[in-house]
């Protein structure tokens, strides 16, 4: 079973408007409210792909209850750690020919006691699963090494840890003794880690970059290349994965959907080819849908067959 972790979930609220009028009343009738956060996008895709999963994280207040209710509505199994503070809203105003204005609440500040208590709660959940995904930014109050500690706990429990974060929390995990099983940095994040420019179209340069000491001990590194697919390193092997040309409806959440595909294939110990093609396919399927963190499982097999894979 896969455990998905979202430490700072939100209610994603979408307000579609023909035109956003500043300093005036804007009325909206077609409102969408969903349980949001990168880890919950992963959860939805895993559920749609008929995988057994358990969603967890930190929630509180009326908004936290709404998040849990939305997951219940989608029949997604969950066990959250509850705090006294209120969880957050994340508002997206869609307006004026595809423009999007976002208003994101910071969310709660996690106390030291709650941070410690969640770790104990998380440790109990690890006994039920074989793979864990850790996604998104950390809420206020948690140190940059919080994910690193969670990865270490997973490793000590024999659970594969798939980490999708950036900045100081990613760096702390790479410097820790126990490494994540998989990371999914983009071009910018690799450049920041190495303090040098990176061109993902330069395959030889990318191979050299991913062999830098900072990445030592990480089993899988998957670098998204957008419409061009992905480049991956698994131990000492390098792979180039290409995807077909598709009609893009909404690219938001595609990285989370890719992570879900990678997690489900890693969890069942598939071959390198199947792992990467599964991740690319679930990511593609999300871009073809209007809804974020959503795939049509009936399209999985035909599009999986269109993904090409080669060792380089």
Image (cartoon, grey):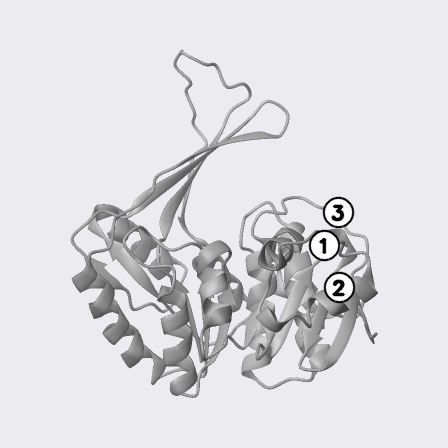
- Mark 3, Cα crowd under 10 Å, few <14 / some 14-19 / many 20+, is few
| Extreme residue in the top direction | 24
Q: Quadrant of residue 158?
A: bottom left
Q: Residue at x 69, y 64 (%)?
A: 280
Q: Residue at x 30, y 45 (%)?
A: 107
**Label 3, label 1: how far apart the Cα atoms are:** 28 Å
Residue 296 in the image, given as x and y percentages of width and height: 62, 60
For label 2, the residue is: 206
Q: Nearer the viewer, residue 161 or 92?
A: 161
For label 3, the residue is: 247
Q: Residue at x 76, y 75 (%)?
A: 238
Q: Is residue 115 above or below residue 251?
A: below
Of the numbered discs 1 and 2, the one sitting upstream in the chain is 1
Q: For this view, does 61 lie left or right of residue 200?
A: left
Q: For this view, does 287 lie left or right of residue 49?
A: right
Residue 198, which numbered label?
1
Answer whether residue 43 is visible to the viewer in this image. Answer: no
Helix, strand or loop under label 2: helix
């Amino acid at each position: 079973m896969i455990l998905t972790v979202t430490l700072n979930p939100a209610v994603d609220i979408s307000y579609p408007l023909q035109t956003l009028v500043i300093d005036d009343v804007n009325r909206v009738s077609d409102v969408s409210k969903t349980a949001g956060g990168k880890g919950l996008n992963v959860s939805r895709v895993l559920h749609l792909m008929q995988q057994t999963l358990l969603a967890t994280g930190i929630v509180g207040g009326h908004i936290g209850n709404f998040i849990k209710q939305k997951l219940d509505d989608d029949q997604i199994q969950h066990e959250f750690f509850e705090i006294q503070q209120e969880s957050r809203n994340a508002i997206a105003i869609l307006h004026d020919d595809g423009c999007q204005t976002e208003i994101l609440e910071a969310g709660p500040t996690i106390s030291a006691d709650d941070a410690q208590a969640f770790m104990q709660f998380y440790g109990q959940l690890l006994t039920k699963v074989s793979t864990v995904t850790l996604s998104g930014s950390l809420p206020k109050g948690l140190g940059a090494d919080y994910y690193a500690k969670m990865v270490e706990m997973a490793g000590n429990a024999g659970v594969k840890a798939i980490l999708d974060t950036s900045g100081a929390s990613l760096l702390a995990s790479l410097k820790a003794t126990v490494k994540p099983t998989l990371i999914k940095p983009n071009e910018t994040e690799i450049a920041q880690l190495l303090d040098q420019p990176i061109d993902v179209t330069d395959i030889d340069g990318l191979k050299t970059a991913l062999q830098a000491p900072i990445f030592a001990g990480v089993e899988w590194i998957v670098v998204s290349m957008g419409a061009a697919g992905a480049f991956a390193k698994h131990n000492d092997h390098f792979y180039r994965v290409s995807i077909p040309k598709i009609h893009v409806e909404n690219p938001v959440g595609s990285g989370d959907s890719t992570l879900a595909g990678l997690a489900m294939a890693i969890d069942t110990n598939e071959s390198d080819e199947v792992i990467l093609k599964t991740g690319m396919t679930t990511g593609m399927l999300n871009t073809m849908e209007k809804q974020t963190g959503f795939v049509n499982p009936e399209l999985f097999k035909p599009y999986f067959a269109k993904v090409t894979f080669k060792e380089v």
